[in-house]
Image: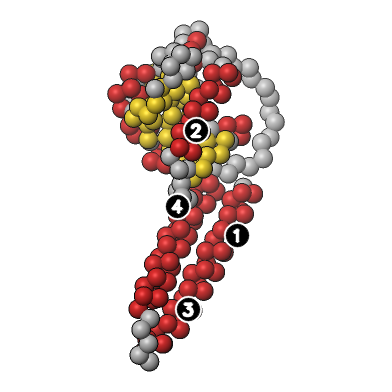
Amino acid sequence: LRQTQIKQKYGLKSLEYLILKLDGELISLYNRKEFGENVDLAIRNKEERKEKYIKASEELKVQIQKEKTLTMSAPHFIGIIRVEPPAYIDKEMISNKEIELIGMKIAMDYEVKNGRKPEDVSSENLGFDIRSKDRENKVRYIEVKTRAHIGDVALTQNEWFKAKRFEDDYYLYAVVNSALKPKLYIVRNPVENLEVEQKVESVRYIIAFNEIETKGDEEIE
């Protein structure tokens, strides 16, 4: 919530100030043009900059609205439940910190290599592991799933909910065979583009590796 307020207070206001400033400069330039000055190039340049700022402002508003809808109220403690994976869940899908770190590094490096600025938010339980921005401040919400070998992946209810919420802005980065020769598969909007093989007690959404392999983009090996 605090980050959203900062974006709203400083990001939007800065863009609004720049747009208003350009409006004033354009009015002055159009007045000079009426008196015969050749200012067409200056007008065109400022109009292009104004359009760029307007577009950035609209995208930031959408981003702020999305993040606002995800804001939760303070939790109220009721009790504690211990949840263990059912016996029929593949052991490969049980969390392994060392394997997860390999996958996160591959995903972060891939984002940097492709000109984006990734932020590791995996510890914040947001339903995604990485928030990554490109040069135009367009955001990718990335969930990283890592397997030591070849295998299915599972999304939690929270991850599945956020994937539904963010749609084409949500990406599944599946790193398989990380113990030997890692391969990264990228699936945009996994809720729309992947079939869920099995729903385990409303806790996890199981996606077969074959789904990821055939419908994802293989980026690294």
Furthest toward the left, the residue is 214
Mark 3 = which residue? 25
State the separation of the CA atoms marked 1 and 3.
22 Å
Of the numbered discs 3 and 2, the one sitting upstream in the chain is 3
Q: Are marks 1 and 4 in contact (CB under 8 Å)?
A: no
* Of labels 3 and 2, the one closer to you: 2
Who's the residue at 56% across and 64% down the image? 14
Of the numbered discs 4 and 2, the one sitting upstream in the chain is 2
Nearest the camera: 82 or 127? 127
Amino acid on which disc 4 is placed: Glu
Nearest the camera: 108 or 194? 108
Residue 41 vertical position relative to residue 127 in the rendered view, above or below: below
State the separation of the CA atoms marked 2 and 1.
29 Å
* Of labels 2 and 1, the one closer to you: 2
Residue 109 image label: 2
Q: Are marks 4 and 3 in contact (CB under 8 Å)?
A: no
Who's the residue at 36% across and 84% down the image? 38
Measuring from the top left, give residue 64's x and y in whole percent: 52, 52
Mark 4 = which residue? 136
* Of labels 1 and 4, the one closer to you: 4
Inspect this view and state whether residue 148 appears.
Answer: no
Measuring from the top left, give residue 146's x and y in whole percent: 48, 21
| Position of the C terminus by quadrant | top left
Mark 1 = which residue? 10
Of the numbered discs 4 and 3, the one sitting upstream in the chain is 3
Badge 1: residue crowd in 10 Å (few <14, some 14–19, many ≥20)? few
State the separation of the CA atoms marked 4 and 2.
19 Å
Furthest toward the bottom, the residue is 35
Residue 131 vertical position relative to residue 206 in the rendered view, above or below: below
